[in-house]
Image: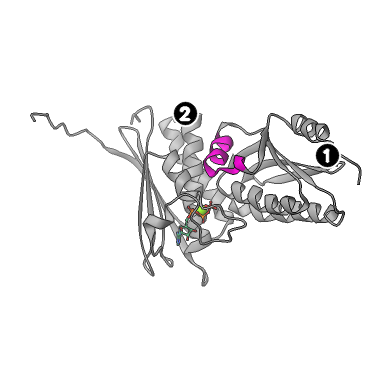
Amino acid sequence: MNSECRVEERKLCNRLEAVFPAISQNEGLARAVAAAFAAQADPTVEELTEIRTALSEAVSNAVIYGYPQGEGQVRLELSLYSDGRFVMVVEDQGVGIPDVERAREPLFTTGDAQERSGMGFTVMESFTDRLDVVSAPGKGTRITMVKQLDQSYEL
Amino acid sequence: MNASCQTTWEGSCLVASLSGEVDHHQAAALREQLDEEISRKSAVKRPIHLIFSFEKVTFMDSSGIGVIMGRYNKIRETGGTVFITGCGDYVDRILEMSGIYTIARREESVAHALYQCGKAGQIYEQ
Ligand SMILES: Nc1ncnc2c1ncn2[C@@H]1O[C@H](COP(=O)(O)OP(=O)(O)OP(=O)(O)O)[C@@H](O)[C@H]1O
Ligand SMILES: [Mg+2]
């Protein structure tokens, strides 16, 4: 094999960090922040919808499951790169997920089975290009979603 | 933006027009409102049907699936059917993924769903 390995030039263009209490009122706020931040890369309407939906899933999970015993914080980090790569990180310092592989399966839920469908991770996966979940009991949960936007961002 | 829900009864069919952003934060109020409407008529021992309209929904995540599923369980107890109408592409994609269409019927519009109920002799005054 003699394939040439080219290192793609990828520069960080902009980054935003926000920390907010894990309360449901902030789900809409987080979506609005992400949409406003992503808007600078001139995304398509479809891309914006996918970003808002995937982010909403991650933030609601942190709010619903992260802190069953009380209050906590959610950290949101948004990064935009010169090649149009958009990265969203949603992190909580809550209870964590004992079995990540199982939690990611469609229809798996530990929530109220009448009202939660267990489709959050599936939606995140299908609306972004990549989903990483780092979690351990008592250590919190860190969700990283990568979305490659169609047009590359120009500084 | 808040989600809201307008409900009207067409005989034994409850038409629920959702609007705004359907997320986890808004879902609780929607559930409460719909359950109250359903329980108003579920004492009458005849099937109640529920027709959702998503025409004015501007955003929905997986919480919306839960809203439909939870109501489906109540409607099923009466022997009725749940219809889903007016979904945009994204709402439809999320609902499709969840397999909700195996328990709820997709119709083009509220009028189509009402027609289906009427055809089956399932609309009556109560
Ligand atoms: N931040 C988190 N902290 C702790 N547990 C979590 C977290 N996020 C997800 N989980 C666990 O993973 C499961 C699956 O999450 P997923 O979002 O796929 O479904 P759900 O939230 O249960 O239902 P839905 O999102 O469809 O309403 C949850 O039921 C919960 O047990
Ligand atoms: Mg979820």
- The x and y percentages for residue B90 are 55, 35
Left or right: residue B111 compared with residue B102: right
Q: Is residue B70 above or below residue B111?
A: below
Q: Which residues are magenta?
A: B90-102
* Of labels 1 and 2, the one closer to you: 1
Identity of the residue furthest to the left in this view: A2
- The x and y percentages for residue A10 are 25, 36
Q: Residue at x 55, y 47 (%)?
A: B62
Left or right: residue B40 compared with residue B113: right
- The x and y percentages for residue A42 are 44, 29
Name the image quarter holding the N terminus of chain B. Answer: top right
**Front-lying residue, B124 or A23:** B124
Residue picked out by circle 2: A44
Residue picked out by circle 1: B122
Whether discs 1 and 2 lie on one chain: the answer is no
Q: Residue at x 87, y 41 (%)?
A: B11
Q: Report crowding for label 1: few under 14, some 14 to 19, many 20 or more residues within 10 A (C-alpha).
A: many
Tell me the subunit letter for badge 2: A
**Front-lying residue, A36 or B111:** B111
